[in-house]
Image (spheres, coloured by chain):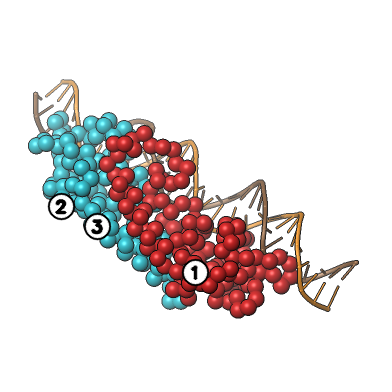
Chain colours: A cyan, B red, C orange, D brown
DNA sequence: ATAATACCTACTGTACAAGTAGGTATTATA
DNA sequence: TATAATACCTACTTGTACAGTAGGTATTAT
């Protein structure tokens, strides 16, 4: 299940896209508009700036803005960065210990298929479709 | 993320299908073959018997068997019964309080679409495909 | 100098997942 | 009729992770 981290990150991206104009959007305003905790959002944002999806500038008058056109973001990349893991089962999560039943496991192909359809869906949707 | 309840339920169904022959399969044997806790499995099974997916008979020589051909079970129904919820986000879970942002929510359609593709995938797979 | 911002790190309460534990009810069989 | 083996039921436990709260530092415009 998608946690608040991914869901809030998406709402932040939508909010910035809708309000950036030609300037920078303070996270304080995003938090107020979205009814979310500023302090919590500050913990969620770093992977997005770290991977260049948004740019933040410090100091008075600072804030965030997108680095690309909304149509250039797919939802999957936003969620993969902010969500802990998008795998449908823990044994497919990154860093999961190699399962010793893997060879004879009758269900792993099912879970891999499920992961594939969800990733394809999320990668096919872009940010501008949500505005 | 699919929890152990749904994953174990699936393995139980596969194990019963593979071992029932023309008799009944004791859960104790399933637990031993699958390397799972019998006591834990006993908590997971009731919704499957309650909805008639498997039939259990008590007493010595008892156990469980399928009520239909493996090809007649779809994976989605097994998971929906044993998993707490298959919704991709908590606001789409059954019994979730009506979200007051629902009307203006820009992301709910995305989550509904994600739920749709996962349900379609899981409903399209049948138990016999896993044997 | 000050105010407003991004950015950083530690701590906390709650809920739930994943079991453990100890029973009762039912049925075949010796 | 006693016993063993099963399904079925309910309470309790433990660890972990989610969803924050809290208190700072660094940077920049005015």
What residue do we see at 41% from left, 62% from top? B122
| Residue identifier under label 1 | B72
- Labels 2 and 3 touching (C-beta < 8 A): no
Please give left or right for residue D12 compared with residue A38 in the image.
Answer: right
Q: CA distance from mark 2 to mark 1?
A: 43 Å
Work out whether mark 2 precedes mark 3 in sequence or the reverse, and give the earlier one. 2
Q: Quadrant of the N terminus of chain B?
A: bottom left
| Residue identifier under label 3 | A123
What residue do we see at 15% from left, 52% from top? A72
The chain carrying label 2 is A
What residue do we see at 48% from left, 60% from top? B77
Above/below status of D8 relative to A61: below
Please rate how many residues cluster around mark 1, counting C-alpha atoms within 10 Å: few if below 14, some from 14 to 19, many from 20. Answer: few
- Labels 3 and 1 touching (C-beta < 8 A): no
Determine the secondary structure under disc 2. helix
The chain carrying label 3 is A
The chain carrying label 1 is B
Q: CA distance from mark 2 to mark 3?
A: 11 Å
Determine the secondary structure under disc 3. helix
Please rate how many residues cluster around mark 3, counting C-alpha atoms within 10 Å: few if below 14, some from 14 to 19, many from 20. Answer: some
What residue do we see at 31% from left, 36% from top? B103
Q: Position of residue D1 (x, y in %)?
A: 90, 66
Snapshot quadrant of residue B2: bottom left
Please give left or right for residue A72 compared with residue A104 in the image.
Answer: left
| Residue identifier under label 2 | A72
- Which of these two is toward me, A84 or B19? B19
Determine the secondary structure under disc 1. helix
């Amino acid at each position: 299940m998608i946690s608040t981290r991914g869901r809030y990150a998406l709402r932040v991206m939508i909010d910035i896209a809708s309000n950036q104009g030609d300037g920078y959007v303070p996270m304080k305003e995003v938090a107020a508009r979205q009814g979310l905790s500023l302090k919590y959002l500050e913990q969620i944002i770093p992977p997005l700036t770290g991977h260049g999806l948004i740019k933040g500038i410090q100091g008075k008058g600072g804030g965030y803005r997108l680095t690309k056109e909304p149509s250039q973001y797919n939802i999957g990349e936003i969620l993969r960065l902010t969500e802990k893991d998008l795998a449908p089962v823990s044994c497919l999560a990154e860093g999961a210990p190699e399962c010793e039943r893997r060879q004879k496991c009758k269900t792993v192909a099912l879970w891999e298929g499920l992961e594939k359809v969800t990733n394809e869906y999320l990668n096919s949707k872009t940010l501008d479709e949500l505005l």
